[in-house]
Image (cartoon, rainbow, N blue to C red):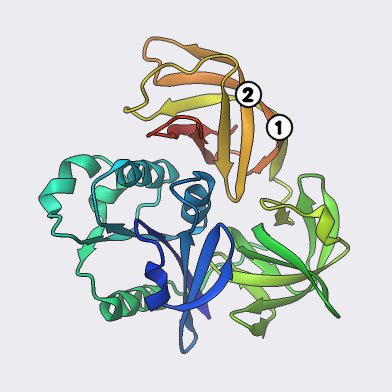
Amino acid sequence: MANLNVAILGAQDYGKDLGKKGTTSDLTFYNLKKGQDTVTFIEPTRYPERLAPLFYAVSIAQKALLIVDQINPAFGESVIMLDCAGLRAGIVILRNYIAREQIAPLVKNTVVDGYEFLEDDKNVIRERFLSDVAAIGTVHDPGTGTMPVDHFFNVRGIGTVVLGSVAEGCIKKHDELMALPGGKAVQVRSIQKHDEDFDCACAGDRAGIALKGIEVDELDRGTILTNDKSIKQVSSITAKADLVKYWPAPLKEGMVLHIGHWMQFVPARIEAAKAEGDWHRTILTVKLDKMLVYRPGSKAVLTYPEGGKLRVVGTLDLP
């Protein structure tokens, strides 16, 4: 079974005609299944009021479905978020008589510039994404696996169950994992994908995992389950930030940004910001409200939720 995660941006409840409604919180999941192929659609339910759901939906996704009903600040912010997250594969649906020529200059030099344009036909869209699943093929198992947790709960008779999408590698039944930050040892008791039992879940799979050795009150959204020893956890970072060209002013000491990586959205206070020449290229030193977990060499998305019409600041190279 292969799975494709698709972020739906620009139209609330669009996914209800594409798949069966699943988990709902500040994110809403819709599940589409045909044979052994599955597609998980993710909508940022509470966006644009809150920025975090937009980041979460994009961070999970392997492809985007961008619905353009109007050209407004939310459209622009969504395009910038997709670009900063590096989500290069996607489909654009234009509605309300909006022409491709109208958005072309707005998406130029972003990942959205390379997206495919389709008509607003739910049957065509479903079949297109299912065909993309079929093209995924077998995921290579490197012997390690990493899954960010987005939901968790206690199930009577089973215990602690977490939901998430595998970010890297494969997680297998009976694996010994670390719950980061912290490093608590947990064991995988069982794995389900789309309500069926499996022995493993690999990159891109949406899975429910029953865990031994940890209680629900020890978990949080953004907890990382991994057996990859190269994964880091840090409480401060000094790294290069690349600000989007639309960001209006240099970053200043004392500002509180949010760093988004995997399912983490962590407040970070700027302790120093040093730019040589162009302030859009800045060396930032930030102190985090809680530990950030990441693979060295990854990129994070910098945001400023108090930023008004534009809240996506840029990217941060994680050392």
Residue extending furthest top? 277
Quarter of the figure with the C terminus: top right
Q: Quadrant of residue 156?
A: bottom right
Q: Quadrant of residue 291?
A: top right
Q: Residue at x 32, y 80 (%)?
A: 127
Q: Position of residue 32 (x, y in %)?
A: 45, 79
Numbered disc 1: secondary structure? strand
Q: Residues within 10 Å of mark 1 (few under 14, many from 20)?
A: some
Residue extending furthest right? 213
Question: Decide: marks 1, 2 in contact (CB < 8 A)?
Answer: yes
Amino acid at dot 2 = Arg
Residue 108 makes an appearance in the image: no
Q: Is residue 22 above or below residue 246?
A: below
Horizontal side of residue 18 vs 57, given as left or right: left
Q: Position of residue 256 (x, y in %)?
A: 59, 25
> In this orientation, which residue lies closer to the viewer: 81 or 2?
81
Q: Is residue 36 above or below residue 99?
A: below
Residue extending furthest bottom? 35
The number of numbered discs placed on residues in the rendered structure image is: 2
Q: Residue at x 13, y 47 (%)?
A: 102
Numbered disc 2: secondary structure? strand
**Residue 289 has which mark?**
1
Amino acid at dot 1 = Asp
Residue identified by numbered label 2: 269
Q: Residues within 10 Å of mark 2 (few under 14, many from 20)?
A: some
Q: Position of residue 46 (x, y in %)?
A: 50, 53
Horizontal side of residue 255 vs 120, given as left or right: right
Q: Position of residue 283 (x, y in %)?
A: 52, 19
